[in-house]
Image (cartoon, rainbow, N blue to C red):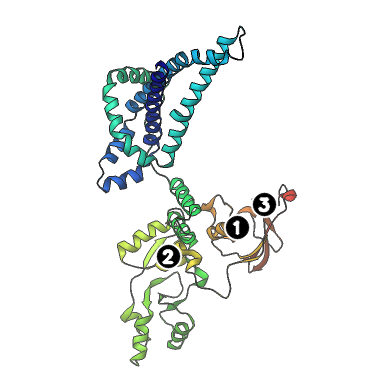
Amino acid sequence: MDLLQNLFLILVLILVSSFFSISEISLAGARKLKLKLISEGGDKRADKIMHLQEHSADFFATSQIGLNAVAILGGSVGEGSLRPYFTQWIGYIYHGQYLDNIAFFTSFVVVTLLFILYADLIPKRLAMINPEKMALLVINPVLVVIKVVQPLVWIINGIANLTFRIFKINTVREESITFDDVSAIVDAGAEAGVVLQQEQHFIENVFELEERTVPSSMTVREDVVYFTLDESEESIRQKIAEYPYSKFLVCGENIDNVIGYVDTKDILVRILNHQSILNIHESTIRNVLIIPDTLTLSELLDKFRANKEDLAVVINEYALVVGIITLSDIMMTVMGDWVAPIEEEQQIIQRDEHSWLIEGSTPIDDVRHALECEFTDWDHYETLAGFIMYRLRKIPRPADFVIHEGLKFEVVDIDHFKIDQVLVTRMPIEMMGESE
């Protein structure tokens, strides 16, 4: 009868210890974002869990009191109750002088294994599987236990806080969420199949709007199509027919003398009404948004929203036009290849598994995504051509090359000092130590 009572007491102690183990893992591991969703659903236990996480000192002190007290009591009760029986059972086969020591060691191992398995390992693994669900189950009993042992908790926390102050340890929990945290969650969701590949691509690109500057997505100066004040009607008609743009800049003598822009539909209305379009600048010209080339895409979105515009002219520090950018350009940056039209001449062409042919004007961020490599000093260049010139420190010539992160960037075509085409090849491992 004594054995059954002792075994029952050990079982109770294991259950108590497993309760503290589950509480410790689940309450510490419960994710704040999920708890907020549960709280918004009307379950007030989630609010208690979040409050406990913010003031966790009392809980952890209570948890350690419970775990250590139960472990000590369980070892004492288990060893004392089981050793006589192990002495008797082992005595049937061994009667030497080490009988008591063997019985003690055997009872110690059995009790320890029971507590490791059923009071620690299994409960903690259960709590890790779904910490929010387990935390909701144990939060109310935990709060009761904390109140019961509050005086002892005050003493323990007082000593712990004094130790932290002596060693100048910061005990404030950092709750901020960074881009790396969100990116890791998105990557994990993509691996689990919860987030689709295109959704992962969109989310990452949205966060990059804070880092990418306007020149990375704009139409560069050389490709801007515009009207001048003294342009002929025939020339205007030809440009409208040749370039499928909805808006055209209107400039003075050159592109740096920007006056405004006109909407193509206003011109078409005049053409359909058989009216002259030579004086279109006077009747339908609109003010254009002028922005510096130092803005990020996120800041430009705010400008578009505030000014209710979707077209902007980009100028540099010398007030010279370097390009234009539209709201569609930003959206194309976010959506990437998923909505990009198929062009006859792609900027990045993969020749085989280890080589690419890339236009020099390709934004460096697009190159980074295509080649899966990183570039530093982004403030010094925006395109692949700019990167090569920055690394070479000269105007490149055909066959000049740069080696970066195991990739060889070789200039293959130059057009009036402008890098037109770059051949990128992945170098063999044995050659990666060589420099240009």
Query: In the rendered view, would you say 394 is above or below 79?
Result: below
152 lies left or right of 76:
left
Q: Which quadrant of the structure image shows residue 149?
A: top left
Alpha-carbon neighbours of circle 2 within 10 Å: few (<14), some, or many (≥20)? Answer: some
- Which residue is denoted by mark 2 in the rendering? 331
Q: Which residue is mark 3?
A: 406
Q: CA distance from mark 2 to mark 3?
A: 32 Å
Give the vertical position of 337 relative to 299 (above or below). Answer: below
Where residue 376 appears, as percent x and y from the top left, is 56, 49
Give the percent coordinates (x, y) of residue 371. Answer: 60, 57
Q: Which residue is identified by label 1? A: 371
* Three-letter code, disc 2: Met
Give the CA distance from mark 1 to mark 2. Answer: 22 Å
Residue occupying image coordinates x 34% and y 67%: 309
Q: Amino acid at mark 1?
A: Leu
- Neighbourhood count class around disc 3 (C-alpha, 10 Å): few under 14, some 14–19, many 20 upward: some
Q: Secondary structure at mark 1?
A: helix
Can residue 170 be seen here? The reply is: no
Which element type, helix, strand or loop, lies under badge 2?
A: helix
Q: Earlier in the sequence, mark 3 or mark 1?
A: 1
How many callouts does the rendering have? 3
